[in-house]
Image (tube, grey):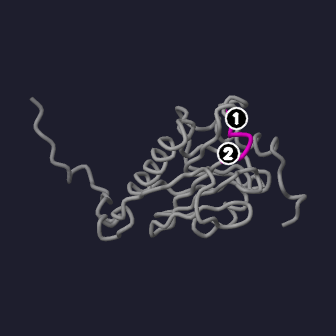
Amino acid sequence: MDASTLLDRDGLLAIWRRLTATTEFGQREPYELDERGELRVSSRLSARRQIVLTDVYCQLTAQMGHLAAMSVPVTTPSFGIRDPDVVWVPGDRWESFEHGDPVPFVPDLCAEILLDSDRKQEIDRRVKGYLEGGAREVIVVSPRGQVEFWGTTGPRQASMFGVALSLDRAYFEERAWPSPSVFSVKRMRRRDLVLPDPI
């Protein structure tokens, strides 16, 4: 990749602010910007991925303190503005930036949950981007529920922060969850709806 095509932090923030300004009621669609400032739309979280993400968040806050957050955009020096699933930083770092923009640094701990995720193909780049940007550790939860801890020298046997995640196996069993087609709603014509008579 030619370094001259990478946008600096200010260039990425300018694009981010334009995109954010067009969202309605402060709701932001799940998107990221790659290192060139190109929009990367993420798929919506499945119900079970949301549950696992929340479980990881709750376990991190219980073990490390309440300075974790879910799906917070962070600025990386070589990977754009990305949304790790869960992040944690010491309190003094949370207070050091404007909270309306993406976090201007990569948090000390980032976690990615790959269950029902479109991020599997680029997880190596994500881990590398977070670690090069200053993360001290990256936790990756595989689609089968294995928890991996990564540092700048590669995979670790255990978390440098002393984190131990205990995730329910049922989250990762396909047969325990209905297929997405069960939840799909067919488009109906108005005359197909049965409405009660007005009183």
Residue 196 percent location from the top left of the image:
12, 40
Q: In this view, does 149 lie to the left or right of 75?
A: left
Q: State yes or no: discs 2 and 1 in contact (Cβ < 8 Å).
A: yes
The stretch in magenta equals 100-108
Q: Is residue 151 left or right of residue 24?
A: right
Position of 144 relative to 45 (above/below): below
Residue 119 percent location from the top left of the image:
58, 63
Task: Classify mark 1: helix, strand or loop.
Answer: helix
Residue at 69% x, 40% y is: 103
Q: Which quadrant of the figure has residue 1?
A: bottom right
Q: Quadrant of the C terminus?
A: top left
Main SS type for the magenta part? loop
Residue at 53% x, 44% y is: 70
Distance from the alpha carbon under mark 2 to that under mark 1? 9 Å
Residue 50 percent location from the top left of the image:
43, 52
5 and 194: which is toward the camera = 5
Q: Is residue 49 left or right of residue 83?
A: left
Residue 31 percent location from the top left of the image:
60, 50
Number of marks in the image? 2
For marks 2 and 1 on the same chain, the one whose residue lies earlier in the sequence: 1
Give the amino acid type for the residue marked by disc 1 in the picture: Arg
Residue at 47% x, 55% y is: 165
**Residue that badge 2 annotates:** 107
Q: Determine crowd level at label 1: few under 14, some 14-19, many 20+ residues with C-alpha closer than 10 A.
A: some
Circle on res. 167 = none
Give the amino acid type for the residue marked by disc 2 in the picture: Pro
Examine the structure image and report whether residue 139 is included in the region drawn in magenta. no
Position of 143 relative to 77 (above/below): below
**Residue that badge 1 annotates:** 93
